[in-house]
Image (cartoon, rainbow, N blue to C red):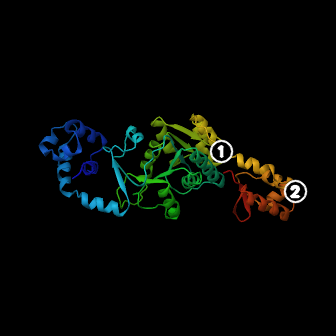
Amino acid sequence: MKGEEYNFWLCSIPGIGIRKLLLLEKELGTPEQVYRAGEERLVKIKGISARDAHNIVTSRQTFSPERINGEMEGLDMRCTTWFSPEYPAPCRHLYDPPKRLFYRGALPKEQLCVAVVGARDCSVYGRETARRFASVLSAAGVGIISGMARGIDGWAHQGALEGGGRTYAVLGNSAEICYPAEHAGLYRSILKRGGVLSEYPPGTKAAPGFFPMRNRIISGLSGGVLVVEARKKSGSLITAEQALDQGKDVFAVPGRVGDSLSEGCNNLIREGAVLVTTPEDILDYYGIVCENRTENFKKNKLILERREKMVYASLSLEPKHLTVLAEEVQMDSAEVMGCILSLLKCGLVKEIGNHHYIRNVI
């Protein structure tokens, strides 16, 4: 076997976690030396039980690097282990770091990555906020980490792609499985402009217990975690708690009082999370200078006609129906529709569906 194959073998043995790996490394040296050690030598290592030693020895007989390499090559997948130089340095500081990271595409290499997480059943406001923050941060060279789940996660990845930067998805199943299936197009785009990572070997399907586990990797790879929308009891708050335990920065977008999707974020802010209302708040926090991406919109607004300015001023990230807009600006629906068409052409407005419109903040 080759060096990396010994690394992979040692990190694939069931029941041998990071602490035992470190014991073996301290006593015997490299994974290859562990591979060559006899069972009698292994049981003499303090912290290595007789059962551990037996598992190590018997695993040599079943381990097939040719089969595993062929399987990963067929999936266009690679694996980095605890002993590999390319193993992400931030993950080494986790309390329970993954022994292996399987990935398609690339591993995060940015100087700063920020995780963007939030509710699966997010509002349009949350969706557009996540997309906006991720886009601006991505354009400034910040890597965007998330879990490719429905809702905030997916829109954070989408925003990062629109910003022209790189984004990385950490999955609760193996890296070759796109979950949820509806994100197949997004999955392919992430592979081209970032990577998909998992600690689970090929063929592992999603399971409820895997998602809380993957959250520690999402926060571990990131310098800070941004929570956009979250209920009082939310998986996103688990990610935020793990980030705090890891000594990472936690940012939260405030929400409306009484809105269940805002309770988690508002509680985080109450407990000391950094309140942010624009992506520039995060860039300023880290001392990153970049061009103001809203400048083009300011220029566009200057050339709008008076009626268009009135309609635009009435819009926000909360969808409004055409008839509601007409009442607010005291114009008939046909006039408002004409203004909306002009604003759509300028890229200042988005149609959400069924004559509902919001500001386009990107």
Relative vertical location of residue 259 with respect to residue 179 in this rendering, above or below: above
Front residue of 272/192: it is 192
Q: Which residue is mark 2?
A: 330
Q: Exactly how many numbered labels are in the figure?
A: 2
Q: Quadrant of residue 358?
A: bottom right
* Apparent side of residue 85 relative to residue 144 in the rendered image (left or right): left
Label 2 to label 1, Cα distance in Å? 29 Å
From the viewer's perspective, tell me whether residue 292 is left or right of residue 203.
right
Q: Which amino acid type is shown beneath numbered disc 1?
A: Gly
Q: Left or right of 292: which side holds 100? A: left
Front-lying residue, 69 or 182: 69
Q: Is residue 280 visible?
A: yes
Q: Residue at x 17, y 56 (%)?
A: 61
What kind of residue is marked 2? Gln
Expressed as whole percent of the image width and height from the top left, the position of residue 153 reads 54, 53
Q: Quadrant of residue 341?
A: bottom right
Disc 1 packing (10 Å; few <14; some 14–19; many ≥20): many
- Residue drawn at the location 36% of the way across and 55% of the way down: 78
Q: Which residue is mark 1?
A: 255
- SS class of the residue under badge 2? loop
Mark 2 or mark 1: which is in front?
2
Q: Indicate the position of residue 113 as horizontal and vertical percent values.
A: 50, 43
Classify 10 Å Cα crowding around label 2: few (below 14), some (14-19), many (20 and above): few
